Amino acid sequence: MKRILVTGGAGFIGSHLCERLLKEGNDVICLDNFFTGSKKNIVHLLDNKYFELVRHDVIDPYKAEVDEIYNLACPASPIHYQYNPIKTVKTSVMGAINMLGLAKRLKAKILQASTSEVYGDPAIHPQVESYWGNVNCFGPRSCYDEGKRLAETLFLNYHTQNNVKIKIIRIFNTYGPRMHPNDGRVVSNFIVQALTNKPITIYGDGSQTRSFQYVDDLLNGMIKMMNSDDSFIGPVNIGNPGEFTIKQLAEKVIDMTGSKSQIVYEPLPGDDPVRRKPDISLAMEKLDWQPVVKLEQGLANTIAYFDELLKN
Ligand code: NAD
Ligand code: UDP
């Protein structure tokens, strides 16, 4: 049995990860400050004697004896990470330093949940890991993008300088049950708007693209990465290469929910990337991983989740 620490474990992805790691027979510590996460996401795990919940902020050091660390603590939706941008930088950077320090002391393996945002508004398409990115260090998204970029740098340097066993995955837009209904991300926004017959808010003209990955596919990639050979540190893209315009997503959600919602167009937020799609050749080669859940199936599961949530 491995002892595993999941920071940000009460969030959308973290809660699914805790659940999966427990199912696989591990002892799990879920650490969270509940900024965007919620006890509701993990309340069903509290009776499991191999699950421990710790309220803690990663900007402060934390000690526990563990074999592996998944570092997910960080708000991920633009509304939430821009709410207190200084705190977002502190969470990414000081959180990385504290967790890397812990991994160093314990000789534990540590995985960083990095992001496709390190590519910024990408000048090459699809995005490969060797691309350095096109990030504005002075814009509204920079607290998140630069925080995550610096975290990658810290991971690399703890590895080269202190032999810490590191793993970096760059996660592309991921969706699924337990996304926060008000967190402003496009999939949850559109589904909640459609189910309540409210206007569907497309920012800009809806021609910008994203590639949407269902959370179960991400978990498979993430755990495969953690369990891969120590010599493979990444960074590796984990995303679904299916590319859709935001308008196509809106139409699909309206269609699948049978909603009466109308589409309305609102201003595009600053620095919103125009196109995004992962090149996953590296993950296929090194991890023998690729996503299997089609957008329609993942959306159906997510719509069913929000439908139930909105009834209560
Ligand atoms: P989320 O907001 O649901 O989860 C983040 C969790 O971190 C929350 O439970 C939150 O309370 C916690 N947290 C935030 N600041 C903290 C702090 N200072 N100390 C302790 N806990 C803190 O978001 P998510 O979508 O589950 O994202 C999880 C991770 O994956 C994040 O690091 C995010 O950057 C990364 N990621 C997500 C996506 C995506 O599409 N969902 C894409 C790329 C990267
Ligand atoms: N978006 C939109 N309407 C919404 C929420 C988001 O048109 O109600 C757009 C947003 O401008 C971006 C895309 O959808 O172009 C994805 O946004 P999200 O916040 O989910 O993720 P990110 O921009 O970080 O990829």
Image: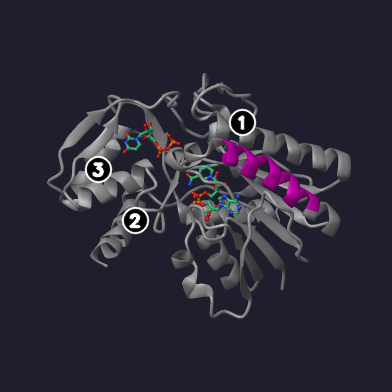
Q: Is residue 257 visible?
A: yes
Residue at image coords 52%, 74% = 45
How far separated are the C-alphas under marks 1 and 2? 30 Å
Amino acid carrying label 3: it is: Lys
Could you say which disc has been placed on residue 135 in the image?
A: none
Which SS does the magenta portion mostly show? helix
In the depicted structure, whether residue 125 falls above or below residue 47: above
How far across and how far down the image is residue 237, in percent?
58, 39
Q: Which residue is mark 1?
A: 146
Residue 89 counted in the magenta span: yes
Mark 1 or mark 3: whose residue is earlier in sequence: 1
How far across and how far down the image is residue 38, in percent?
47, 61
Quick one: SS at disc 3? Answer: helix
The number of numbered discs placed on residues in the rendered structure image is 3
Quick one: quadrant of the C terminus?
bottom left
Q: Nearer the viewer, mark 3 or mark 2?
A: 2
